[in-house]
Image (cartoon, rainbow, N blue to C red):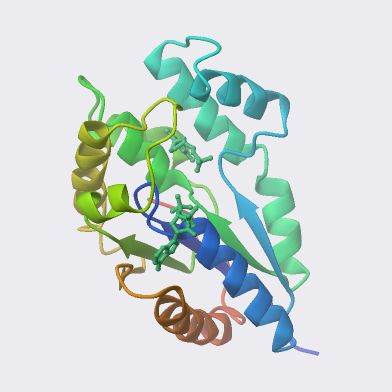
Amino acid sequence: MSYRRGALIVLEGVDRAGKTTQCQKLVQALQQSGQAAEMMRFPDRATKIGQLISSYLEKKSNLEDHTVHLLFSANRWEMVPLIRQKLEEGINLVVDRYAFSGVAFTSAKPGFTLEWCMNPDMGLPKPDLVMFLQLNPSMAENRGEYGIERYETSAFQRTVQQRFEELMQDSSVNWKVIDAARTIEEVHKDIKLLSEDIISLAQNQPVGELWR
Ligand code: ADP
Ligand code: 2DT
Protein backbone atom coordinates (compact mmCIF):
# COMPACT_ATOMS: atom_id res chain seq x y z
CA MET A 1 0.00 0.00 0.00
CA SER A 2 1.30 3.47 -0.80
CA TYR A 3 2.26 5.81 2.03
CA ARG A 4 -0.63 8.08 3.00
CA ARG A 5 -0.11 10.57 5.76
CA GLY A 6 -2.69 12.72 7.45
CA ALA A 7 -2.91 16.45 6.78
CA LEU A 8 -2.00 19.15 9.29
CA ILE A 9 -4.81 21.69 9.21
CA VAL A 10 -4.74 24.84 11.36
CA LEU A 11 -7.47 27.33 12.19
CA GLU A 12 -6.41 30.81 13.23
CA GLY A 13 -8.17 34.08 13.95
CA VAL A 14 -8.87 36.57 16.70
CA ASP A 15 -10.82 35.58 19.83
CA ARG A 16 -14.50 34.72 19.13
CA ALA A 17 -13.91 34.21 15.40
CA GLY A 18 -15.31 30.68 15.79
CA LYS A 19 -12.11 28.61 15.73
CA THR A 20 -13.09 26.10 18.40
CA THR A 21 -16.63 25.69 17.05
CA GLN A 22 -15.30 25.09 13.53
CA CYS A 23 -12.46 22.74 14.59
CA GLN A 24 -14.97 20.54 16.40
CA LYS A 25 -17.38 20.53 13.47
CA LEU A 26 -14.62 19.73 11.00
CA VAL A 27 -13.34 16.78 13.04
CA GLN A 28 -16.89 15.44 13.32
CA ALA A 29 -17.58 15.86 9.61
CA LEU A 30 -14.32 14.18 8.59
CA GLN A 31 -14.96 11.27 10.94
CA GLN A 32 -18.50 10.89 9.61
CA SER A 33 -17.14 10.69 6.08
CA GLY A 34 -14.84 7.86 7.16
CA GLN A 35 -11.59 9.82 7.55
CA ALA A 36 -9.41 9.58 10.65
CA ALA A 37 -9.34 13.00 12.30
CA GLU A 38 -8.43 14.41 15.70
CA MET A 39 -8.41 17.87 17.23
CA MET A 40 -5.48 19.52 18.99
CA ARG A 41 -5.24 22.98 20.49
CA PHE A 42 -2.51 25.40 21.50
CA PRO A 43 -1.74 26.26 24.14
CA ASP A 44 -2.13 22.68 25.38
CA ARG A 45 -2.75 23.54 29.02
CA ALA A 46 -2.42 19.92 30.20
CA THR A 47 1.40 19.66 30.11
CA LYS A 48 3.79 21.13 32.72
CA ILE A 49 4.70 23.94 30.33
CA GLY A 50 1.00 24.37 29.51
CA GLN A 51 0.22 24.79 33.21
CA LEU A 52 2.72 27.65 33.48
CA ILE A 53 1.09 29.26 30.44
CA SER A 54 -2.41 28.72 31.78
CA SER A 55 -1.58 30.32 35.11
CA TYR A 56 -0.09 33.32 33.21
CA LEU A 57 -3.20 33.64 31.01
CA GLU A 58 -5.45 33.46 34.06
CA LYS A 59 -3.34 36.24 35.62
CA LYS A 60 -2.48 34.00 38.57
CA SER A 61 1.20 34.53 37.78
CA ASN A 62 3.35 37.02 35.91
CA LEU A 63 6.01 36.01 33.42
CA GLU A 64 8.46 38.18 31.55
CA ASP A 65 7.23 38.71 27.94
CA HIS A 66 10.12 36.98 26.12
CA THR A 67 9.94 34.10 28.57
CA VAL A 68 6.25 33.44 28.02
CA HIS A 69 6.72 33.64 24.25
CA LEU A 70 9.35 30.90 24.46
CA LEU A 71 7.09 28.82 26.69
CA PHE A 72 4.27 28.99 24.12
CA SER A 73 6.76 27.84 21.48
CA ALA A 74 8.12 25.07 23.74
CA ASN A 75 4.52 23.93 24.28
CA ARG A 76 4.30 23.33 20.52
CA TRP A 77 7.72 21.66 20.26
CA GLU A 78 6.91 19.24 23.06
CA MET A 79 3.94 18.00 20.99
CA VAL A 80 5.96 17.56 17.77
CA PRO A 81 6.72 13.83 18.28
CA LEU A 82 3.00 13.19 18.79
CA ILE A 83 2.03 15.37 15.80
CA ARG A 84 4.47 13.49 13.55
CA GLN A 85 3.30 10.12 14.84
CA LYS A 86 -0.38 10.90 14.22
CA LEU A 87 0.28 12.26 10.73
CA GLU A 88 2.32 9.16 9.88
CA GLU A 89 -0.54 6.97 11.11
CA GLY A 90 -2.76 8.71 8.56
CA ILE A 91 -4.66 10.78 11.12
CA ASN A 92 -5.69 14.26 9.96
CA LEU A 93 -4.97 16.81 12.68
CA VAL A 94 -7.23 19.82 13.07
CA VAL A 95 -5.43 22.37 15.23
CA ASP A 96 -6.99 25.29 17.10
CA ARG A 97 -4.20 27.98 16.98
CA TYR A 98 -0.52 27.34 16.17
CA ALA A 99 2.67 29.36 15.76
CA PHE A 100 0.76 32.16 13.98
CA SER A 101 -1.11 33.02 17.18
CA GLY A 102 2.22 32.84 18.95
CA VAL A 103 3.73 35.48 16.69
CA ALA A 104 0.60 37.65 16.36
CA PHE A 105 0.03 37.91 20.13
CA THR A 106 3.61 38.51 21.26
CA SER A 107 4.38 40.93 18.43
CA ALA A 108 1.30 42.93 19.45
CA LYS A 109 3.29 43.84 22.58
CA PRO A 110 5.64 46.83 22.40
CA GLY A 111 9.25 46.10 21.43
CA PHE A 112 8.74 42.78 19.59
CA THR A 113 9.44 42.30 15.88
CA LEU A 114 7.72 39.62 13.80
CA GLU A 115 11.15 38.20 12.97
CA TRP A 116 12.17 37.73 16.62
CA CYS A 117 8.82 36.14 17.39
CA MET A 118 8.99 33.71 14.45
CA ASN A 119 12.46 32.38 15.27
CA PRO A 120 11.66 29.81 17.98
CA ASP A 121 8.91 28.22 15.85
CA MET A 122 11.06 27.87 12.71
CA GLY A 123 11.19 24.24 11.62
CA LEU A 124 7.95 23.12 13.30
CA PRO A 125 5.84 20.74 11.19
CA LYS A 126 4.43 23.04 8.54
CA PRO A 127 0.64 23.09 8.29
CA ASP A 128 -0.64 21.95 4.90
CA LEU A 129 -3.41 24.54 5.23
CA VAL A 130 -3.99 27.51 7.54
CA MET A 131 -7.51 28.89 7.49
CA PHE A 132 -7.81 32.37 8.91
CA LEU A 133 -11.30 33.07 10.22
CA GLN A 134 -11.75 36.71 9.33
CA LEU A 135 -14.08 38.63 11.61
CA ASN A 136 -13.81 42.31 12.34
CA PRO A 137 -13.15 43.06 15.98
CA SER A 138 -16.46 44.87 16.53
CA MET A 139 -18.39 41.80 15.31
CA ALA A 140 -16.25 39.59 17.51
CA GLU A 141 -17.18 41.76 20.48
CA ASN A 142 -20.86 41.24 19.67
CA ARG A 143 -20.42 37.49 20.15
CA GLY A 144 -20.07 37.93 23.89
CA GLU A 145 -18.22 39.85 26.52
CA TYR A 146 -14.48 39.44 26.56
CA GLY A 147 -13.42 37.22 29.42
CA ILE A 148 -11.03 38.06 32.17
CA GLU A 149 -7.96 36.32 30.75
CA ARG A 150 -4.89 38.22 29.70
CA TYR A 151 -5.05 39.68 26.15
CA GLU A 152 -8.88 39.81 26.19
CA THR A 153 -9.29 43.51 25.48
CA SER A 154 -10.52 45.06 22.27
CA ALA A 155 -7.46 47.32 21.83
CA PHE A 156 -5.05 44.37 22.08
CA GLN A 157 -7.20 42.19 19.77
CA ARG A 158 -7.13 44.92 17.12
CA THR A 159 -3.34 44.99 17.15
CA VAL A 160 -3.29 41.17 17.01
CA GLN A 161 -5.51 41.33 13.91
CA GLN A 162 -2.98 43.68 12.23
CA ARG A 163 -0.13 41.31 13.02
CA PHE A 164 -2.06 38.38 11.53
CA GLU A 165 -2.53 40.46 8.37
CA GLU A 166 1.24 40.97 8.16
CA LEU A 167 1.84 37.23 8.64
CA MET A 168 -0.62 36.43 5.86
CA GLN A 169 1.62 38.26 3.35
CA ASP A 170 4.00 35.29 3.60
CA SER A 171 3.33 33.12 0.57
CA SER A 172 5.42 30.21 1.92
CA VAL A 173 2.38 29.36 4.06
CA ASN A 174 -0.84 28.06 2.47
CA TRP A 175 -3.22 30.68 3.91
CA LYS A 176 -6.92 30.74 3.09
CA VAL A 177 -9.04 33.56 4.42
CA ILE A 178 -12.56 32.52 5.43
CA ASP A 179 -15.34 35.04 5.97
CA ALA A 180 -16.30 34.13 9.54
CA ALA A 181 -19.16 36.65 9.75
CA ARG A 182 -21.60 34.14 8.20
CA THR A 183 -23.59 31.41 9.93
CA ILE A 184 -21.77 28.49 11.57
CA GLU A 185 -23.03 26.14 8.82
CA GLU A 186 -21.96 28.41 5.95
CA VAL A 187 -18.47 28.81 7.40
CA HIS A 188 -18.26 25.05 8.02
CA LYS A 189 -19.14 24.23 4.41
CA ASP A 190 -16.15 26.23 3.10
CA ILE A 191 -13.78 24.83 5.72
CA LYS A 192 -14.84 21.26 4.95
CA LEU A 193 -14.33 21.65 1.20
CA LEU A 194 -10.89 23.24 1.57
CA SER A 195 -9.89 20.55 4.09
CA GLU A 196 -11.00 17.66 1.90
CA ASP A 197 -8.98 19.08 -0.99
CA ILE A 198 -5.84 19.46 1.09
CA ILE A 199 -6.21 15.99 2.63
CA SER A 200 -6.01 14.39 -0.81
CA LEU A 201 -3.18 16.69 -1.92
CA ALA A 202 -1.04 16.24 1.20
CA GLN A 203 -1.31 12.49 1.53
CA ASN A 204 1.60 11.68 -0.77
CA GLN A 205 3.83 14.60 0.19
CA PRO A 206 6.34 14.87 3.04
CA VAL A 207 5.51 17.21 5.93
CA GLY A 208 7.24 20.56 5.39
CA GLU A 209 9.16 22.74 7.83
CA LEU A 210 7.54 26.00 8.92
CA TRP A 211 9.28 29.27 7.92
CA ARG A 212 12.32 27.48 6.45
P1 ADP B 1 -12.92 31.13 19.19
O1 ADP B 1 -12.47 29.71 19.43
O2 ADP B 1 -12.40 31.66 17.89
O3 ADP B 1 -12.64 32.06 20.33
P2 ADP B 1 -15.61 30.06 19.52
O4 ADP B 1 -15.76 28.94 18.56
O5 ADP B 1 -15.34 29.72 20.95
O6 ADP B 1 -14.52 31.11 19.00
O7 ADP B 1 -16.92 30.96 19.41
C1 ADP B 1 -17.10 32.13 20.22
C2 ADP B 1 -18.61 32.35 20.45
O8 ADP B 1 -19.22 32.72 19.22
C3 ADP B 1 -19.34 31.09 20.93
O9 ADP B 1 -20.36 31.51 21.79
C4 ADP B 1 -19.90 30.51 19.64
O10 ADP B 1 -21.07 29.75 19.86
C5 ADP B 1 -20.20 31.77 18.84
N1 ADP B 1 -20.06 31.57 17.38
C6 ADP B 1 -19.14 30.81 16.74
N2 ADP B 1 -19.30 30.89 15.40
C7 ADP B 1 -20.34 31.72 15.18
C8 ADP B 1 -21.01 32.20 13.99
N3 ADP B 1 -20.62 31.85 12.76
N4 ADP B 1 -22.04 33.04 14.16
C9 ADP B 1 -22.44 33.43 15.40
N5 ADP B 1 -21.88 33.01 16.56
C10 ADP B 1 -20.83 32.17 16.46
P1 2DT C 1 -7.43 30.14 24.14
O1 2DT C 1 -6.95 28.97 24.95
O2 2DT C 1 -8.76 30.67 24.56
O3 2DT C 1 -7.31 29.90 22.64
O4 2DT C 1 -6.48 31.36 24.53
N1 2DT C 1 -1.59 32.69 22.60
C1 2DT C 1 -1.81 31.48 22.05
C2 2DT C 1 -0.33 33.28 22.63
O5 2DT C 1 -0.13 34.38 23.14
N2 2DT C 1 0.71 32.59 22.07
C3 2DT C 1 0.56 31.36 21.49
O6 2DT C 1 1.53 30.76 20.99
C4 2DT C 1 -0.78 30.79 21.47
C5 2DT C 1 -0.99 29.43 20.85
C6 2DT C 1 -3.92 33.57 22.40
C7 2DT C 1 -5.13 31.30 24.49
C8 2DT C 1 -4.55 32.70 24.52
O7 2DT C 1 -3.13 32.60 24.35
C9 2DT C 1 -2.70 33.38 23.24
C10 2DT C 1 -5.06 33.57 23.40
Residue 26 at x, y percent in the picture: 58, 73
Q: Quadrant of the N terminus?
A: bottom right
84 relative to 131 in the view: left or right? right
136 relative to 40 in the view: left or right? left
Label count reads 0
Q: Is residue 65 visible?
A: yes
Q: Is residue 68 above or below residue 192?
A: above
Q: Is residue 3 visible?
A: no
89 relative to 126 in the view: left or right? right
Give ligand 1's quarter of the image: bottom left
Q: Is residue 162 above or below residue 133?
A: above
Give me the residue at 44% from left, 45% from top: 99
Give me the residue at 61% from left, 20% from top: 52
Q: Is residue 192 above or below residue 125?
A: below
Give me the residue at 46% from left, 16% from top: 67
Q: Quadrant of residue 131?
A: bottom left
Q: Nearer the viewer, residue 17 or 70?
A: 17
Give me the residue at 47% from left, 86% from top: 193
182 relative to 5 in the view: left or right? left
Q: Nearer the viewer, residue 187 or 2?
A: 187
Q: Nearer the viewer, residue 131 or 201?
A: 131
Residue 191 at x, y percent in the picture: 45, 77
Residue 89 at x, y percent in the picture: 78, 69
Residue 59 at x, y percent in the picture: 49, 16
Q: Is residue 39 above or below residue 187?
A: above
